[in-house]
Image (spheres, rainbow, N blue to C red):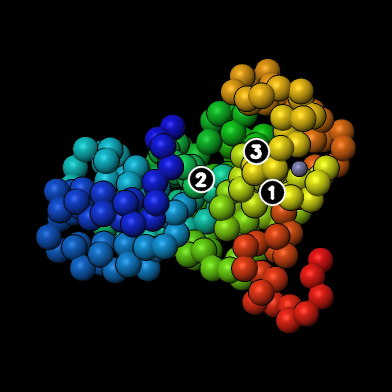
Amino acid sequence: MDTPKTVTERKDDIQFLMKYAVPEEQVDMAEALLEKFDSDIIALNLLHSFYVHLPEGKDDSVKILRLLTRSQGVFLLCVSTGNGLHYLYLANNEAAHIIGTLAEGIVDRQLLDFFGYENNKEVLALTEKPEKLQEYEPYTPDSNLCPSCHASVGEFHTLGCPVEICPWCSGQLTYCNCRFTRLDIDALNKVAQIEKLLELLEADGRIAFKKEHSPGYLSDNLSDDDE
Ligand SMILES: [Zn+2]
Ligand SMILES: [Zn+2]
């Protein structure tokens, strides 16, 4: 995984890569798409992945992004290109990866299970007419998604998400000391410790994402009374 980048750094990198990748007649369209998504880290990670490794190794551009589904902050997206090709990509707030062409669908069993598809046939039935898939829209505070890890309302955050609330002290799980006191350790850096933490969190009622947990939600939506 790449280290997470800020949206501005990602956008700058993409603009640089686009100079070499986008055919001249597709430049305006490709730039308009980048502008549309310039504050959406999911789309920016996807664009970065596309322009770093052009799927066919030939000049091309991203024309339309469509959303098949998403789960726990991982988005399954269809990328349609200026050259008229279609691909499937996975993206989260850290990175994006190509799965393959849209026509191949998903063969990986784990990936099918992750998104709740019974088999590749189900995926291919959805992608047969890509123009019928919903267009992917940039993140807004009304998106019902965690602004940091992009989990949906009711889903658990990616462990380590700064928006996750601690079930023990109701503070921010990544900032309070509960993870150390509960595990009786000074530093949390081993996989086994993280697994143990997850076990304890789940046993004591891990707190799923709610819109009210978004930073800024209270000040924007409530004038008095705090939670
Ligand atoms: Zn989150
Ligand atoms: Zn705590």
Q: Quadrant of the N terminus?
A: top left
Q: Residues within 10 Å of mark 3 (few under 14, many from 20)?
A: few
Q: Residue at x 62, y 56 (%)?
A: 146
Q: Nearer the viewer, mark 3 or mark 1?
A: 1
In the rendered image, the vertical position of residue 35 relative to residue 21, given as above or below: below
Quarter of the image with the C terminus in it: bottom right
Earlier along the polypeptide chain: callout 2 or callout 1?
2
Disc 1 residue crowd, few under 14, some 14–19, many 20+, Cα 10 Å: some
Give the amino acid type for the residue marked by disc 1 in the picture.
Answer: Gln
Residue 159: numbered disc? 3
Picture coordinates of residue 76 (x, y %)?
A: 53, 47
Observer able to see residue 83 = no
Q: What is the secondary structure assignment of the residue under circle 2?
A: loop
Q: Is residue 147 above or below residue 91?
A: below
Circle 3: residue type:
Leu
Question: Residue 166, image x and y in percent?
Answer: 76, 45
Q: Residue at x 56, y 53 (%)?
A: 148
Residue 15 image point, x, y percent: 23, 55
What whole-number distance in Å separates the C-alpha atoms at marks 3 and 1?
12 Å
User: Which numbered mark, 2 or 3, is in the foreground of this view?
Assistant: 3
Q: Point out which mark residue 92 bears.
A: 2
